[in-house]
């Protein structure tokens, strides 16, 4: 409403922009262009709007957060191009925003046509004077094979702009683009990625989607995979095989997110094996995001045991292949549902796998996600149950520090978090401890210095002569001092 626009487009926009241009070209007044899917318009008269759901008014939602949560969930359930209804949101002074259903997904041919347009394949020349865009190489030598995602992670807004129905390009279109890439003067033989929002979603989730769209009230993978879900990597694998066989190509990597649970559910290991053998460049990044099931359920992610099984299988396959390739998990702190107990569980996991994340994603509210609604309203809009939300910046800092507990700069925050959560047992000298006590009464300066280190330096600096008894006393002294 406050944009002042007559009409807005949402989603990927290719269909909407053409239909809108055609309508304007035919001489229609913009006020009469109310029929284009994938557009939103404002009006003071909804008498001619048909088949719609009226949402609570903007003003009433400003007063009542729970009403907003309900309204959001209605929108969430109407993001599908086949089943989504028209939505009407009333505003003061008898104004309305009307959101037409999303545009229909592009067919394979349409996707191929969009990607065959004469793109410049580089950044805008205006960047030249500031030295160009270093990341261009990664983008320039990557292929987009799909769009859309039926993963349904709560913190992702993709459902709203690309939808859950996969849209893919043909092998021919991708091979054609790969050939263009190989002729680029800067190409060194490496295709950096073949993917999209989720690399290994290269066909629709189920047969039903082709005719009726995605289920409004059911997720394809969460909490368990739907019985109609087609779990198969054959087509994607066939594409990767063709690409890596092209002249001039040394390696084809897959760096877009791999949905690890989907990969694990595939009874045929061929894709898993070939991915590890040919398409991983030393480390595979996956996104379990957390390990506490209480948080994972709020994130819309599978239970931790699924990730554990995946990690085990990944290690087993790589060992068989004789490859030393690591699994790098993306982890998120302070997501709604994560209290200090859950954050400590995550820190203990990081300890157990001997991993020191260089970067931690701290949950940050972004538009159009279930997680953001939880953050703002304190309820899960899917069932309206209360959710614990870490909002206080200090608590968020503690949760974040816990994941990087080995970083000496995080020492005080980690210590405070552990004591606050009643986990003083994780401060000490045992190899399971996250940090060591810093101020040691009655120990030499040299030992003191060693004891400031976290357990990552264990073995190097552990004071082997100290008895368990005296360790406990030291911890008690530290607690007393505090
Ligand atoms: S039937 Fe299952 S796989 Fe198909 S859209 Fe519905 S939830 Fe997803």
Image (spheres, grey):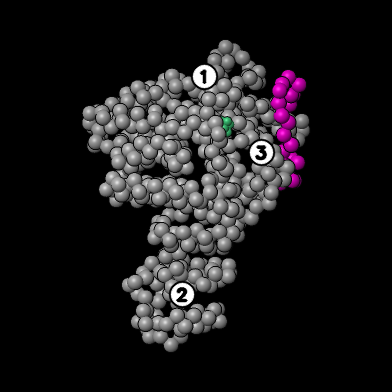
Question: Which one is closest to the eye, mark 2 or mark 3?
Answer: 2
Q: Distance between the residues labelled 1 and 2?
A: 65 Å
Residue 46 among magenta residues:
yes
Q: Relative to 412, say whether 468 is above or below.
A: below
The residue depicted at 52 percent of the width and 32 percent of the height is 229
Name the residue tied to disc 2: 428
Q: Which residue has dot 1 on it?
A: 18
Q: Picture coordinates of residue 444 (x, y %)? A: 38, 85
61 to 400, vertically: above or below: above
Q: Residue at coordinates 69% horizontally, 49% vertically from top-left?
A: 385
Taking the magenta stretch, the answer to whether it contains residue 400 is no
Start-end of magenta stretch: 44-65
**Would residue 186 be found to the left or right of residue 444 on screen?**
left
**Residue 384 visible (yes or no):** yes
Neighbours of disc 1 within 10 Å: few (<14), some (14-19), many (20+): few
Q: Which residue is drawn at 48% across and 47% down?
A: 306
The reply to whether residue 253 is in sight is no
**Which of the four quarters of the rendered structure image does ligand 1 lie in?**
top right
Mark 3 / mark 1, whichever is N-terminal: 1
Q: Which residue lies furthest to the front in this view?
A: 267
Badge 3: how crowded within 10 Å, few (<14), some, or many (20+)? Answer: many
Q: Dot 3 lies on which element? A: helix
Q: Which of 281 and 390 is in front in this view?
A: 281
Query: What's the mark number on residue 73?
Result: 3
Q: Quadrant of residue 250?
A: top left
At x 58% / y 15%, what residue is drawn?
A: 23
In primary-sequence order, the first of circles 2 and 3 is 3
- Is residue 35 positioned above or below 414 on the image? above
């Amino acid at each position: 409403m406050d944009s002042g626009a007559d009409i807005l487009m949402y989603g990927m926009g290719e269909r909407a922009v053409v239909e809108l241009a055609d309508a304007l070209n035919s001489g229609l007044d913009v006020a009469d262009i109310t029929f284009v899917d994938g557009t939103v318009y404002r009006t003071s008269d909804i008498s001619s709007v048909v088949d719609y759901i009226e949402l609570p008014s903007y003003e009433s939602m400003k007063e009542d957060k729970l009403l907003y949560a309900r309204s959001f969930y209605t929108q969430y359930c109407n993001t599908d191009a086949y089943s989504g209804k028209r939505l009407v949101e009333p505003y003061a002074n008898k104004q309305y925003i009307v959101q037409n259903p999303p545009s229909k997904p592009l067919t394979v041919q349409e996707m191929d046509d969009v990607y065959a347009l004469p793109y410049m394949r580089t950044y805008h020349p205006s960047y030249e004077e500031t030295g160009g865009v270093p990341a261009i190489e990664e983008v320039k030598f990557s292929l987009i094979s799909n769009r859309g995602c039926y993963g349904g992670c709560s913190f992702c807004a993709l459902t709203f702009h690309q939808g859950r129905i996969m849209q893919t390009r043909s092998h021919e279109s991708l091979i054609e683009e790969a050939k263009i890439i190989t002729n680029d003067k800067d190409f060194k033989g490496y295709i950096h990625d073949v993917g999209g929002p989720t690399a290994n979603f290269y066909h629709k989730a189920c047969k039903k989607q082709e005719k009726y769209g995605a289920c409004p009230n059911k997720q394809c993978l969460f909490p368990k995979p739907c019985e109609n879900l087609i779990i198969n990597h054959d087509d994607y694998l066939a594409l990767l095989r063709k690409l890596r066989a092209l002249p001039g190509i040394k390696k084809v990597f897959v760096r877009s997110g791999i949905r690890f649970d989907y990969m694990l559910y595939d009874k045929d290991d061929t894709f898993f094996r070939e991915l590890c053998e040919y398409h991983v460049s030393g480390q595979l990044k996956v996104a379990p995001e957390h390990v506490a099931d209480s948080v994972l359920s709020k994130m819309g992610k599978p239970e931790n045991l699924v990730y554990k099984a995946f990690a085990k299988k990944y290690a087993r396959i790589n060992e068989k292949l004789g490859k030393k390739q690591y699994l790098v998990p993306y982890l998120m702190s302070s997501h709604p549902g994560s209290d200090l107990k859950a954050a400590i569980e995550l820190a203990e996991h990081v300890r157990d796998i001997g991993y020191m994340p260089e970067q931690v994603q701290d949950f940050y509210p972004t538009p159009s996600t279930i997680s953001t609604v939880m953050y703002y309203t304190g309820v899960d809009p899917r069932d309206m149950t209360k959710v614990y939300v870490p909002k206080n910046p200090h608590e968020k800092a503690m949760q974040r520090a816990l994941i990087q507990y080995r970083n000496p700069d995080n020492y005080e925050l980690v210590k405070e978090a552990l004591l606050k959560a009643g986990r003083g047992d994780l401060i000490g000298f045992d190899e399971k401890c996250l940090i060591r006590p810093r101020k040691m009464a009655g120990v030499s300066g040299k030992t003191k210095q060693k004891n400031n280190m976290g357990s990552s330096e264990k073995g190097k600096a552990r004071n082997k002569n100290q008895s368990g008894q005296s360790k406990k006393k030291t911890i008690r002294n530290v607690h007393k001092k505090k």
